[in-house]
Image (cartoon, grey):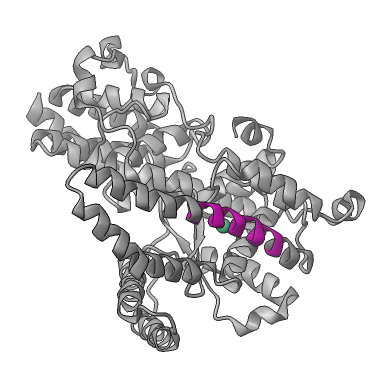
Amino acid sequence: MTKLLIQKPLRVIQLIVISILFFSQSLISQEQTAITTAYVPVPYYPINLDSLTAQYRKEYNSSIKEYEGNYKDKTKEIYEGRFSRIKEQLANGDFYFNPIIDTYFQNILQEIIRGNPELNKHTLRLFVSRDEYPNAYCRGDGTLIFNLTLLRFLDNEDQIAFIIAHEIAHQTFDHVCTAINKRTEYIYSKETKKKLKEINKNPYNRYTNTVELYKEYIFDDRRHSRLHESDADDMGLTYIKNTKYNPLASVETLKILDTVDEQPEEASFNIKNVFDNPAFPFQDKWLKEKETIGFFMGSDDTEEKILVKDSLKTHPDCQKRIALVSEKLPPFDTAAARKIVFTDEFAKMYTYSEFEQVANFYYYNQTGKSLYTALCLLKKYPDDAWLYTQISRTLLELTEAQENHQLSQILEFPASYHAKPYKDFLTFIRKLRLREMALLNHHFTQKYQEKFPDYAPLEELAEEVRTVAVRLK
Ligand SMILES: [Zn+2]
């Protein structure tokens, strides 16, 4: 992954686009004031929630009506759960309906449908999500979700197109509903019930035997879901061949997905360099890991982490999937002759994905992660005033949380599964005493307020940070 990101030939072009994106506003007023560049987070874009929710309700009702299996009540429960989930996500503002981001992704979906008119018979909806994990998935009800943060791992629009085509294929094969139905049939079947009864009769090894019973099922289920992945790759590639996108991107995409768990190299920074200040010198003891910290460490294999590992890439099968997809590619010359669709638009979206990561962590009250990702971006965007403001804002919130003994609600404990730079960062923040955190922030904010004298949000915040620092001195 690291290599991929470094070798990106698009860095320069990206920078140009970013400049146009974020500098243009200030260029207008360039003559009067010094230039300040500052990212503007994508705001919530109001949509007609009621009509969309009603549409989902209607579709769920009819899919339950059409269900012909043996366990209608149980299936209804699951479908209801799925309906509640999307309703909640829509109401939470989890998706970007902002015209710039949404239109970009809808155009990709439309291009795939244009090339494959048979897709018109499906109700396909594509939502771009604020979710923190680099992932894309098919809900099984025609809704495809693409997490914006996945873009940070991609190089061009062709790769996005392949991922969307793959998810469309899951829908057209009806993989999700088939899996739900199969699971229900298994769990509630007479045979399973009988086996469970047998297990319960025996007072010994009840737990182990139950686990064994489900293991059998899960193993079988996994094997099938692997087959599903290759089918979806295959069909996805077929869709892509009918579009303007380059089919070669399929292999590239799978290679990237194979390493998506690894942290990009950019996800690190030198804590000391960022916060060292002649007025408030950095203390090396802040970086030293305490022996006792292990006691507070988070658990290693959170369910969340396992789920994520299992979702998009279904590791370790990516290599097999790559081999299978490669066989289906058109002759290299033909494929290579089609140009990779790299656009300024992609670069713009890529930049959004970087900055929105910071904004979204904040949006979901993950203050510590918001601070960390903002610090990581400083290296690439050292002149963005919003980043410094975000660092100051999150540090202020962490200070107040520490004062109220609520730090753990917005900042994780370092854990062994964390990548080293993030773990070091957590260790550092946890080491700061209340007074130190307040002063460190005060001196940091003051320094950058001088750098961006025209940026009002930082100026306002600096006053607040100063007040807290004086109070805690
Ligand atoms: Zn898949």
Q: Is residue 2 left or right of residue 459?
A: right
Q: Is residue 217 above or below residue 55?
A: above
Of residues 210 and 239, the one drawn nearer to the viewer in this rendering = 210
Of residues 19 and 159, the one drawn nearer to the viewer in this rendering = 159
What segment is highlighted magenta in the picture?
221-235
- The quarter of the rendered structure image containing the C terminus is top left
Q: Is residue 72 left or right of residue 178?
A: left
Q: Give how far across and how far down residue 168 sits, in percent.
A: 60, 68
The part of the image, by quadrant, that contains residue 425 is: top left
User: Is any atom of residue 23 visible in this view?
Assistant: no
Q: Give how far across and how far down residue 240 sits, in percent.
A: 73, 64
Q: Give how far across and how far down residue 300 sits, in percent.
A: 32, 32
User: Residue 436 in magenta?
Assistant: no
Q: Is residue 451 left or right of residue 289?
A: right
Q: Is residue 440 above or below residue 404?
A: above
User: Residue 224 in magenta?
Assistant: yes
Of residues 62 and 335, the one drawn nearer to the viewer in this rendering = 62
Q: Residue at x 47, y 50 (%)?
A: 219
Q: Is residue 16 left or right of residue 392?
A: right
Please name the predominant secondary structure of the magenta segment in the image.
helix
State the residue lying farthest toward the right: 333
- Image quarter where ligand 1 lies: bottom right
- The quarter of the rendered structure image containing the N terminus is top right
Q: Give how far across and how far down residue 197 sits, in percent.
A: 24, 60
Of residues 197 and 9, the one drawn nearer to the viewer in this rendering = 197
User: Is any atom of residue 410 visible in this view?
Assistant: yes
